[in-house]
Each structure stands twice: as structure tokens, then as C-alpha cells.
Image (cartoon, grey):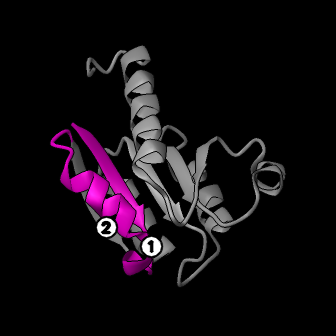
Amino acid sequence: MIRLLLVSPNLDSISGFFEFVEKQSEISVLETDTGAKALDIISVEKLDLVIADEDLQDMTCLEFVKKMVMANPMVNCAVISSMPDDKFHEATEGMGILTRLSPAMDEKQLKELILQVQEILRLSGDGRK
């Protein structure tokens, strides 16, 4: 089971995510709308993946990722961003973000992300497949 935290104040705008997750029995999802609440959750929950929207209510996504890495550098993270790939890469280089998801993310993008997280868990000796 992959434990995932979705951090977004705009859940309606990422309906593709929920359509994908509803079909997946191996994914458990927690949701929150602010970076501060997400940091609180990260401090007490064992999470495999955090997906953060680009504009949180209380901070930018990149501010959130920096704080998250300081709180728990072992959490895998993906970011929902409308930035072009080259600008996103430049802005996030060295932050440990697995991937950029488009706001109109599709099943293919999400499947690739979940496979990537499963491989990380397998390689880390977590015992999951």
C-alpha cells in the first residue's frame, strides 16, 4: 500500500488524480489544503509520497518542498506545476522532486509516478512491490 498525501487547495481542478486513485486498491490518500497542515501530517504519518500543488494557500509549493525536506528528507515528492519543463527543472534542481505533474495530469503520468515510487520502495528494502 502506498500512503500518499495530496496538498492542494484546488481539489476540483485535479479531477484526473481522483479518477486514477479510485481505480487503485494499493494507494491510500490523505488530503490537506495548506503547506502548514501538510507539514504537521508529515511529522506524524509514515508517507511514501507527497504530491503538492503549485499554489498553496499559505506558501508557494517550492517553499513547502524546502520545509518538507528539512522536516523529513526521506519523503518522495512530486509537484503539480504549470511551468514548462525546462523552467521547472531550473527552479527545482537539487530539491529531490521526483517529477512535475501537469495540472491536467492524466492516467499515464500518474501510473509512471506510482511505478517510480514502487521501485524506490523496493530498492530501499521496504518489502513492497
Residue 5 location (% of width, % of height): 36, 57
Q: In this view, does 84 lie to the left or right of 123?
A: right
> Counting residues from the N terminus, which is met first, the one under dot 2 or under dot 1?
1
Q: Label 1: few (<14), some or many (≥20) within 10 Å? A: many
Q: Are marks 2 and 1 in contact (CB under 8 Å)?
A: yes
Residue that numbered label 1 is attached to: 8
Closer-to-camera residue (35/9): 9
Bounds of the magenta segment: 1-26
Q: Residue 58: which quarter of the image? A: bottom right
Measure the C-alpha gap from mark 2 to mark 1: 8 Å
Q: In this view, does 20 lie to the left or right of 67?
A: left
State the residue at coordinates (73%, 64%).
83
Q: Residue 18: which quarter of the image? A: bottom left
Closer-to-camera residue (96/10): 10
Q: Specify the amino acid type for callout 1.
A: Ser
Residue 43 shows up from this direction:
yes
Closer-to-camera residue (45/92): 92
